[in-house]
C-alpha cells in the first residue's frame, strides 16, 4: 500500500503523457483523476494505521549514493507527521484534478496538462515522504520542473510529433524517417500566441489554402525582401513549434503587372485538419471561389499580439497617425474593424478610400496614437521598429 501511494500518481502521469494521443482527452482525465482519488483514499487508511496508532513505517528501495562516510538510498519514511501532510496534499490535488476537467476543457493540451498535474502530485509525495535531504531535494526540484515544462512547448511538441510519426509509419510500413504525415495525424500547440500570430497575419498578407480535397488547411506567409528579418522571425516561430520545415526560406522572384519584378519570401506550413476552423472563419465561398472576409467574432481573437502582427504586415506611421491597409475587405467590414478597435482598445479609427478600385485604409487618429504604440510595441520585432519611427 505504501508504494502504491507513491507510484500511482506517477503511473497516471505516464499513461496521460506517453499514451495521451491514443487514450484521448477523456481517457487522460479519467486515468489521472482516478489514480489520484485512489491514492487519497489509501492515504486516509494510512493515516488511521500509522498516524492514529503511532506505528511509523520505513521503506528502503535501493542504494543511491555510497561513499566512505555516507550512504544515501531511495528510502521513504511514513510517520505521524508524514501521513498528516499527505492528507491535505492529496485531497487538494484530487479537487484540482476534478475541477480542471471542466476548467481546462478548452485547452488544446489536455493530456499534457493532466500528465504534468499528476507528475506534480508525485513530486509532492516524494517531497513529503523522503527519508533524506537529497531525495527531498529531488521532489522539490521536480515540482519546479513540472511548473516550467508545461509552458515549454518545444520539447513536448517534438515528442508528440515523433510519437505520431513513428506510430503512423509502423502502421503503414513506410520509411520511418519520412516527414509526410497525414494532415489528420498532425497536431500543434495551437496556444494563444500561435493563434494570435495566425489571426494577425491573416488580416494582413497571409492566406489559408484548403488542401487534399478539403481535408486539411495550410498557411501561406509572404513578405517582400525588405522584410527579410521579419519573415525569418516567422519561420523560426513556426518551425520550432513543428508547424513547418526547418529549411530556411529562399528568395523568390515574381513578375507583377507592368513587368515589375517583385522579390519575396514565402513560407508554407504543413497541412492540418485542425486549421479548418480558421479557414471556415476567414473565408466565404462565393461562386465557387473562397473570398477572405472579416469574421463576426474577430473581437474575441484580436489580441495585442495579433494587432502587432497585422501592423507589421500592413501598417505604417504617417505623421502622428497609424495607417493600416485593408485592401482585401469591403467598406462595411472596415467599419466593423473600426468598431472593434474602439470597443476593445479604445482607439479612434476612421475608414478612408485608397483610391478607385484600391480598397480602403484604416487610420488611427492622433489622439489614439500613443495608446496604439503602448499596445503593440512589446510585440514588435526590432527590425520593424521603423514602421513606428522608433
Image (cartoon, rainbow, N blue to C red):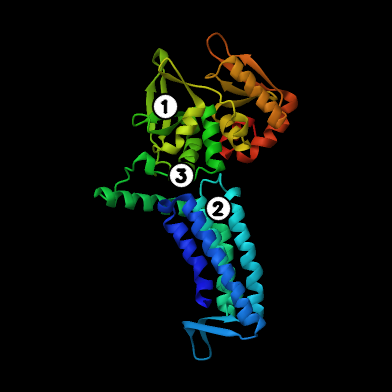
Q: Dividing the picture into quarters, in which one does residue 40 lie?
A: bottom right
Q: Is residue 21 visible?
A: yes
Residue named by callout 3: 188
Secondary structure beneath dot 1 equals strand
Residue pictured at 59% horizontal, 56% vertical: 98
Q: In the shown orientation, is residue 169 left or right of residue 238? A: left
Is 31 displayed left or right of 390 in the figure? left
Q: CA distance from mark 1 to mark 2?
A: 37 Å
Bin the neighbour count of mark 2 within 10 Å (Cα to Cα): few under 14, some 14-19, many 20 and up. few
Image check: 230 left or right of 19?
right
* Depicted 297 relative to depicted 4: above or below: above
How far apart marks 3 and 2 lie (CA) works out to 14 Å
Tell me if residue 123 can be seen: no
Left or right: residue 80 compared with residue 3: right
Residue 263's tag is 1
Q: Quadrant of the C terminus?
A: top right
Please state the total of marks drawn on the protein image.
3
3 or 2: tag closer to the N-terminus: 2
Q: Residue at x 53, y 88 (%)?
A: 70
Which residue is labeled 2 in the image? 151
Amino acid at each position: 500500500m505504501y508504494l502504491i501511494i507513491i507510484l500511482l500518481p506517477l503511473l497516471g502521469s505516464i499513461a496521460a503523457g506517453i499514451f495521451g494521443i491514443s487514450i484521448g482527452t477523456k481517457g487522460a482525465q479519467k486515468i489521472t483523476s482516478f489514480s489520484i482519488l485512489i491514492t487519497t483514499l489509501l492515504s486516509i487508511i494510512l493515516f488511521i494505521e500509522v498516524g492514529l496508532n503511532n506505528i511509523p513505517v520505513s521503506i528502503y528501495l535501493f542504494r543511491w549514493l555510497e561513499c566512505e562516510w555516507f550512504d544515501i538510498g531511495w528510502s521513504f519514511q511514513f510517520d505521524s507527521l508524514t501521513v498528516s501532510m499527505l492528507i491535505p496534499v492529496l485531497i487538494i490535488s484530487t479537487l484540482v484534478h476534478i475541477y480542471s476537467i471542466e476548467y481546462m476543457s478548452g485547452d488544446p493540451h489536455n493530456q499534457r496538462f493532466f500528465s504534468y498535474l499528476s507528475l506534480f502530485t508525485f513530486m509532492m509525495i516524494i517531497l513529503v515522504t523522503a527519508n533524506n535531504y537529497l531525495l527531498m531535494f529531488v521532489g522539490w526540484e521536480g515540482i519546479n520542473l513540472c511548473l516550467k515544462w508545461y509552458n515549454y512547448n518545444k520539447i513536448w511538441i517534438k515528442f508528440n510529433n515523433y510519437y505520431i510519426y513513428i506510430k503512423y509509419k509502423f502502421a503503414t510500413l513506410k520509411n520511418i524517417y519520412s516527414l509526410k504525415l497525414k494532415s489528420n495525424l498532425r497536431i500543434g500547440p495551437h496556444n494563444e500566441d500561435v493563434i494570435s500570430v495566425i489571426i494577425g497575419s491573416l488580416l494582413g498578407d497571409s492566406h489559408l489554402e484548403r488542401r487534399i480535397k478539403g481535408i486539411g488547411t495550410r498557411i501561406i506567409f509572404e513578405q517582400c525582401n525588405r522584410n527579410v528579418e521579419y519573415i525569418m522571425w516567422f519561420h523560426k516561430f513556426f518551425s520550432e513549434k513543428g508547424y513547418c520545415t526547418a529549411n530556411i526560406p529562399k528568395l523568390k522572384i515574381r513578375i507583377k503587372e507592368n513587368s515589375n519584378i517583385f522579390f519575396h519570401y514565402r513560407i508554407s506550413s504543413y497541412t492540418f485538419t485542425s486549421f479548418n476552423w480558421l479557414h471556415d472563419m476567414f473565408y466565404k465561398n462565393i461562386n465557387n471561389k473562397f473570398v477572405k472576409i472579416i469574421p463576426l467574432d474577430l473581437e474575441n481573437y484580436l489580441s495585442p499580439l495579433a494587432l502587432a502582427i497585422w501592423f507589421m504586415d500592413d501598417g505604417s506611421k504617417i505623421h502622428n497617425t497609424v495607417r493600416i491597409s485593408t485592401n482585401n475587405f469591403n467598406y462595411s467590414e472596415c467599419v466593423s474593424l473600426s468598431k472593434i478597435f474602439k470597443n476593445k482598445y479604445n482607439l479612434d479609427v476612421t475608414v478612408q478610400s485608397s483610391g478607385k478600385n484600391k480598397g480602403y485604409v484604416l487610420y488611427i487618429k492622433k489622439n489614439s496614437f500613443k495608446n496604439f504604440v503602448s499596445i503593440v510595441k512589446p510585440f514588435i520585432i526590432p527590425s520593424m521598429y521603423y514602421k513606428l519611427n522608433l
